[in-house]
Amino acid sequence: MSDNPWAAALRDRGYAFVQAPAMADALRPAGLSDWDSFARSWDDLGLDTYMADGGRYRKRRHAAFAVSGAGITRKPDQPHYQSRDYNALNGGIARWFDPVTAAAAGSAAFQAILRTCHALFDGLTPAPAWHVEAHQFRIEARPDQSGQPTPEGMHQDGVDWVLVLMIGRVNIASGTTSIHGLDRTLLGSFTLEAPMDAALVDDHRVFHGVTPVQPLDPEQPAHRDVLVVTFRRETAPTGL
């Protein structure tokens, strides 16, 4: 995995945009199946009640895992924490979200995603084990309120590696991802449109953000669903 074009892009510029056919080709050998069932789990997310901007446009679920060459183990449910250095809007507190359901976490699609990410990221920066967090996000947009995929603005997540995987877009316009260097110079931009389009990010080297989304038809529901998976090195295997 470390010799594929994504690895080269991550080494050379700190990010990669992977279109859906290539991502699907990578996930199938890792066991991808039942994608449609996995994607439907986004219809059952709880409201994010921690939004400091007062917005009620974000729904989510969260889970943590220990991942190493020995396998994948789900950790006990725990809060998601970011310092205000990384998230000036919502950071600085332990945020408890509804957990990812056992069915979604155990699905062949999700397990394939974790195995594929581990092969790629561990191939680039080997570690005994990784602390992995998974976030299911639904951003809703209304005629009177845009949805904010990254309300904290251009940011880093305080981890080593990040995957942002498109699950689906319904009646949504915009949502352009931009990548900036540490000096805030724009390095590139793209829009995750098709299911399985993905952004891969070296969190130490770049900032990333997504523009607000609006409904194409103001009379119809509109939302943008993504899976965000973060990998952070652990010093020793945990729970395996």
Image: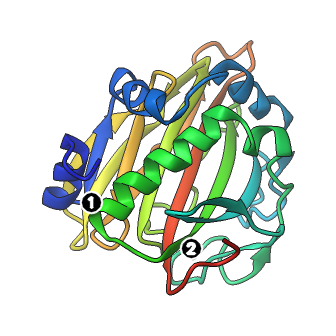
Residue type at mark 2 is Asn
Depth order, front residue of 9/156: 9
Q: Is residue 55 above or below residue 191?
A: below
Residue 163 visible: yes
The image quarter in which residue 143 lies = top right
Quadrant the C terminus occupies: bottom right
Question: Tags 2 and 1 in contact by the CB under 8 Å rule?
Answer: no
The image shows residue 205 at horizontal and vertical percentages of 27, 70
Q: Secondary structure at mark 1?
A: strand
Name the side, left or right, on which 157 lies relative to 238.
left
Badge 2, how many Cα within 10 Å: few under 14, some, many 20+?
Answer: many
Residue ID at (75%, 20%): 221
Amino acid of disc 1: His
**Residue 217, located in which quarter of the rendered image?**
top right
State whether residue 45 appears in this view: no
Q: CA distance from mark 2 to mark 1?
A: 16 Å
Q: How is the image coloured?
A: rainbow
Which residue sits furthest front?
A: 70
Q: Nearer the viewer, residue 191 or 153?
A: 191
Give the residue displayed 49% in from the left and 63% down from the top: 69
Residue 190, given in percent of the width and then of the height, sits at: 31, 36
Pick the front one: 65 or 220: 65
Which residue is tagged 1?
Answer: 180
Res 87 label = 2
Furthest-bottom residue in this view: 235
Residue 236 percent across, percent down from the top left: 54, 85
